[in-house]
């Protein structure tokens, strides 16, 4: 079984792992009912609909 000749330094190890730590923006879609920008697969906080059905009753001011 192969064994590394030298120990991997902390810097090299962190440089290798650093590529996966990026932050990405949240994806948004338009609500088909009211047109508000919402995250996919969630109830619209503006109108309370999900997949074309009213799931949560919202109080209008």
Image (tube, rainbow, N blue to C red):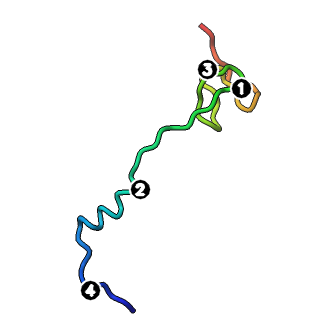
- Give the image location of residue 58, x and y in percent: 64, 18
Residue at image mark 2: 20
**Which mark, by number, is residue 46?**
3
- Confirm or deny contact between disc 2 and disc 1 (CB under 8 A): no
**How many C-alpha atoms fall within 10 Å of the one at disc 4: few (<14), some, or many (≥20)?**
few
Q: Residue furthest right?
A: 53
- Give the image location of residue 47, x and y in percent: 66, 20
Between disc 1 and disc 3, the foreground one is 1
Residue at image mark 1: 32
Residue at image mark 4: 5
Indicate whether 60 appears above or below 44.
above
- Confirm or deny contact between disc 1 and disc 3 (CB under 8 A): no
Label whose residue precedes the other's in the sequence (1 or 4)? 4
**How many C-alpha atoms fall within 10 Å of the one at disc 1: few (<14), some, or many (≥20)?**
few
- Give the image location of residue 27, x and y in percent: 55, 37
Q: CA distance from mark 1 to mark 3?
A: 12 Å
Give the quarter of the image for residue 61: top right
């Amino acid at each position: 079984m192969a064994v590394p000749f030298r120990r991997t330094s902390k810097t090299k190890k962190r440089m290798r792992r650093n590529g996966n730590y990026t932050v990405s923006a949240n994806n948004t879609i338009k609500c088909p009912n009211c047109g508000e920008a919402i995250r996919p697969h969630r109830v619209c906080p503006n109108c309370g609909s999900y997949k074309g059905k009213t799931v949560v009753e919202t109080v209008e001011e």
